[in-house]
Structures are given as structure tokens and as C-alpha cells.
Amino acid sequence: MFYFLFQYLDMVGFPGAGVFQYISFRSAMAFIASLGISLLLGKRIIRFLQRKQIGEEIRDLGLEGQMQKKGTPTMGGIIILASTVIPILLFGDLMNIYVIIMMVTTIWLGFVGFTDDYIKVFKKNKEGLSGKLKILGQISLGLFVGLAMYMSPSIVVRERVIHHNPSMGTEIVINKENTARKQVILGPKEKTTKTTIPFFKNNEFDYKSLVPFDGAFGKIVTWIVFIAAVIFMVTAISNGANLTDGMDGLATGVSAIIATTLGIFAYLGGNVIYAEYLNIMYIPATGELVVFMSAFIGAAVGFLWYNSYPAQVFMGDTGSLAIGGIIAVYAILIRKELLIPILCGIFIAENLSVVIQVSYFKRTKKKYGEGRRVFLMAPLHHHYQKKGYPEPKIVTRFWIVAILLAVITVVTLKIR
């Protein structure tokens, strides 16, 4: 809204209106607005949830301090969703295809999570939305994102041309924000399935290398493989964030750390000068995603004000499914999805701990007649809780691990 207004004012020569063309300025404004909205709106939403007696039903799992959380308001993910969407409507370029996809992702999975929480709270059904319907919602989103990347002419990659030949139709691009005057020679826009991969010479991987076919048929099969990978990642990370949301501030803090890293990647990859300097993939128009992620980080930090130990509100599936989907789709759009196993290591570990626990229990029960466990309890954070670690210590240490993984992820871009 403000973006288009100030764009018009800049065209008519209104003094100072041009500042809204700077991604850095709008990102800062989006963060401030998001943080402010979450702090102000959060208090009112918590009071509303308390009045409606929308409290968390706690199953007694024998965890220390667990039953003290009974009755804590849930569905607080609404705070995160509202605090993310409103600043984007104000400061984002709503015509940007990447912003559109991220807005759809936020609302889509937010709705799936809200439906699950609604059934649990208002219909008094502890099972909530069935697992199949949740997965269907995640798969549908992954399919939408994959098809959008395939069909949209605006989602392209541009490669730096080392040996310049004017007859190739290349173009010289100067950094838009004039933070540097260096010229970069770029090739034509390319619709591709290339992505970033760590530890390889050029930091690039093409899904096409997985397909043993050439020509038009091979291209179609390549995109099918790519879309299948998108669906898998969206589902895995969304569920991983959902499983991580089991302690006060755990999922929120980890998500904020991951989001900050992805925001840096988007800024560098969407800026032609920095992309050339770092020799990383340049993806036009993804710089606008920095505005979105700034709003999301502000929302997460603001929600952490109320969600830190002892939590005044839980995000519920309304928030946890959405934040996982946001992180996954964002990483895919900026072509950093193959860094997810490192960057989202906490989510992956939580996911794997459940898979290992369930699989091993079923296997040993079939073999010995009695199920055995690898962990004291899954997901992983409950294993440490069972070992007697205080909840704040577990959360803080998980945050530290998340920071370490974020640093390693950034470093991998230069280890080739």
C-alpha cells in the first residue's frame, strides 16, 4: 500500500518519497511495524483467548512442570500471522511474484493449522484435523509453489557472463540501490531448476542431472522431480517446526534464527553486485523477499515476548505449521533448499527422533513382543526433559545449536 503510494509520489517529485524504493529502508520499517503489532496485538489476543477459555489441553506425560501449563491460551499463532501479513500489505511490493507466493504460503498453512486448533478447542476433539488432511494441505501448497516456479515467467535466474560477447545479447547491470558502482555483465534470463548446493566448486546443482532423458521430455521430467522435491521439503519442514513447538520459546527462537539467515541470503542473492562479488547465484526480484522476512522476524521476536518461559500463550498449529512452511518455501524460492538439512538441523533432528522412535518401537515389538525405545521420549527435546534438564536450559541450548548451524550454513557458500 505505502510502496505504491510513495512510488507515485516519487514520480510526481514529492521530496523524500524515493526512500521507499530502497529495500533496506522498507525492510527496517516492516520489522519495526511487525514487532510493534505483535507486542500490541499480542496482549489483546491473549486476553481474548483467556476470556473465551481457549486453553491448551495437556496430556500427563510425566514431564516436570508440564501440568502447570494447563489452561495456557493456545492459537497464539494468529499473532505471528497478523504481524507478518499486515506489514507486508503496508511496505511490500504486492505485485512481486515471490511476495505473492509467500503470502499464499502464510495464509494457506495458517488456515490449515487454525482449522486443526479450532477442532481441538471448540469441537473438544483432541485429535484435531486428521493427519491425512494436514499432509494434503502441505502437499497442495508444495504443488502450488512448484507449479508457480515452473509457470511464472518472472521466476528466473541470471548467470554472470565471464567471457563477454556483445552478439550474445547480454546486458550490463549496475546495482539498483547504487551502494556500489561496479558493473556486472549478465546473461539472459533463464528458466531453470538450478539451485545452490554446498561443498561443490560452483555451488550449483541442477535437478536435470537426476534425469536420464534429454529434450522436451527430459525437461518435463526434470520439473516433475523438482516439484516432488518441493512438496517433500515443505511437508518435512512444516512438520518439523510443528514437532519442535513443545517448549516455551523453542520453535519461535529457532525459527527467528533460521529466518535471519535466509533473509541475508535473499538480500545477497537478489543484489547483482553482492551476488557477483560472492560468486553466488543471482536471482532477480528476490531482494523483495527481505521485506517479507523482516516482517516475519519481527513477528517471531514479538511473539517470543509472550511465548518465552513461562509462556503466556502457545502458538498452536496455527503458528507452527505456518512458520515451518514459510521457512521451507522461502528457502526454495531463493534456491537454498539444499542447505535446509544444515540450517534447519533442529527441525530435522526433531522429525528424525520421532521417526526413529516409532520405527524402532514397532520393529522391536514385532520381534520381541515388547516395544523398545531409542529415546526416553520423542520428539528430541522431551528426551532431555526426561533426563532432568530444566526447560529453559534445553531451549537456550537448542538456540545455541541453531546459531551454530546458521553460521555453518553461511560458511558453506565459500567452502568449495
Image (tube, grey):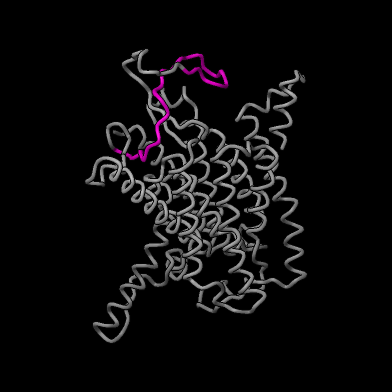
The image shows residue 117, relative to residue 5, as above or below, that is below
> Horizontal and vertical percent for residue 297?
59, 45
Which residue is farthest front? Answer: 216
- What main secondary structure does the magenta stretch of the protein show? loop
Residue drawn 39% across the image and 30% down it: 280
Does the image show residue 68?
no
Q: In the displayed structure, does residue 384 sit left or right of residue 4?
A: left
Where residue 336 sits, quadrant-wise, is top left
Along the line of sight, which residue is nearer the eye, 371 or 89?
A: 89
What residue is shown at x 56% (from left), y 74% (from top)? 128
Q: Nearer the viewer, residue 103 or 353?
A: 103
Task: Pinpoint residue 35: horizontal percent, then vertical percent.
Answer: 68, 45
The segment highlighted magenta reads 173-199
Q: Position of residue 360 (x, y in %)?
A: 30, 73
Q: Splitting the image into 4 quarters, where does residue 247 fall?
A: bottom right
In the figure, is residue 111 to the left or right of 217? right
Query: Is residue 241 at all visible to an observer of this figure?
Result: yes
Quarter in which the N terminus is drawn:
top right
Percent coordinates x, y for residue 179 in the rendering: 55, 19
Q: Is residue 308 above or below residue 177?
A: below
Query: Does 189 appear in magenta?
Result: yes
In the rendered image of this protein, does residue 104 appear above or below residue 370? above
User: 47 or 292: which is nearer to us?
Assistant: 292
Q: Residue furthest bottom?
A: 369
Taking 302 as reference, is 363 left or right? left
The quadrant of the image that shows the C terminus is top left
Q: Is residue 2 above or below residue 130?
A: above
The total of numbered circles placed on residues is 0
Q: Is residue 313 magenta?
A: no
Q: Residue at x 39, y 51 (%)?
A: 227
